[in-house]
């Protein structure tokens, strides 16, 4: 695989709400630390003081799809400049809970927003002139889970945000969006069967780390 920068390593974790991806980020962080790497943990939307403020608006305030997409990329721009690029320049392993694949899945497929507009925003926000390339994760762990199972896991877990409150058809569209993104860039995606138990899912994730980066 081609790294996002000459020294750093950018890995994202994706999946519909309820897929359990966030539960496994710490295990991957520990794996890389055992491998002697410095790890930066972050999330989207969020990761900086400004982006965290925008996160609250995005998760709780009603807005039209264009406003939602614009705020998402505004948060991402600050996150890229303040956290992601500096971490990669230091040579860190950067583990990000969601990135642009989520925007295409949720806003593009889930909301039905214009994919071409999202691609243009992606170019504006993530273009790296020095490398003449688009900043994106070297690897995306995609936690693939049927929406019906995800809904059962989320039921009664906590007060849902506006995305978690969506009906199952919305998450079916989001899941199809992730599948489409993986089909477009198969070399960048590692599909994880998230329908299994937590230990089995973790084994899949760490096994992939060993296959790609070797034993710590």
Image (spheres, grey):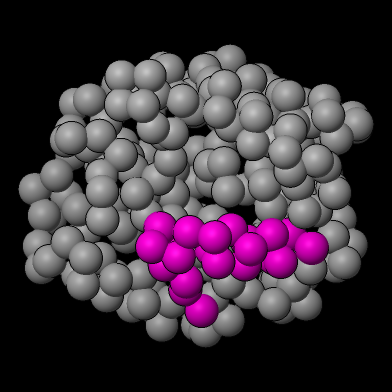
Above/below status of 135 relative to 147: above
Position of residue 25 measured from the top left corner of the image (x, y, whole percent)? 40, 55
Which image quarter is the N terminus in? bottom left
- Which residue occupies the foreground of this view, 197 or 179? 179
Left-right relation of 155 to 23: right
Vertical relation: 79 (above or below) 111: above
In depth, the one of 67 and 186 nearer the eye is: 186
Which stretch appears magenta? 173-193
**Residue 189 lies in the magenta-colored region:** yes
Decide if residue 163 is on the left or right side of residue 143.
right
Q: Can residue 5 be seen here?
A: yes
Badge count? 0
Q: Is residue 2 left or right of residue 197?
A: left
Say which residue appears at 64% left-offset and 36% top-offset.
119
- At x 35%, y 70%, the residue is 205
Judge whether 145 appears above or below 47 on screen.
below
Asked whether the viewer can see residue 92, the reply is no
**Main secondary structure along the magenta-highlighted residues:** helix
- The image quadrant that residue 133 belongs to is top left
Q: Quadrant of residue 91?
A: top left
Q: Residue at x 57, y 22 (%)?
A: 124
The residue under the point 26% across, 48% down is 2
């Amino acid at each position: 695989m081609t790294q996002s920068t000459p020294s750093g390593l950018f890995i994202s974790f994706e999946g519909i709400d309820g897929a359990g991806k966030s539960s496994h980020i710490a295990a991957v962080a520990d794996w890389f630390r055992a491998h002697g790497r410095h790890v930066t943990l972050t999330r989207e939307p969020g990761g900086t003081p400004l982006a965290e403020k925008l996160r609250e608006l995005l998760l709780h305030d009603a807005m039209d799809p264009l406003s939602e997409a614009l705020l998402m990329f505004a948060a991402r721009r600050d996150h890229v400049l303040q956290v992601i690029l500096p971490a990669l320049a230091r040579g860190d392993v950067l583990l990000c809970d969601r990135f642009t694949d989520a925007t295409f899945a949720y806003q593009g497929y889930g909301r039905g927003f214009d994919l071409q507009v999202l691609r243009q925003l992606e170019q504006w926000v993530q273009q790296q002139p020095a490398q003449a390339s688009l900043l994106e994760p070297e690897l995306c762990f995609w936690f693939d889970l049927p929406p019906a199972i995800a809904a059962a896991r989320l039921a009664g877990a906590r007060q849902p945000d506006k995305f978690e409150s969506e009906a199952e058809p919305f998450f079916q569209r989001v899941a199809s969006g992730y599948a489409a993104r993986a089909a477009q860039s198969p070399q960048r995606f590692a599909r994880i069967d998230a329908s299994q138990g937590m230990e089995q899912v973790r084994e899949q994730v760490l096994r992939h780390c060993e296959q790609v980066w070797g034993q710590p």
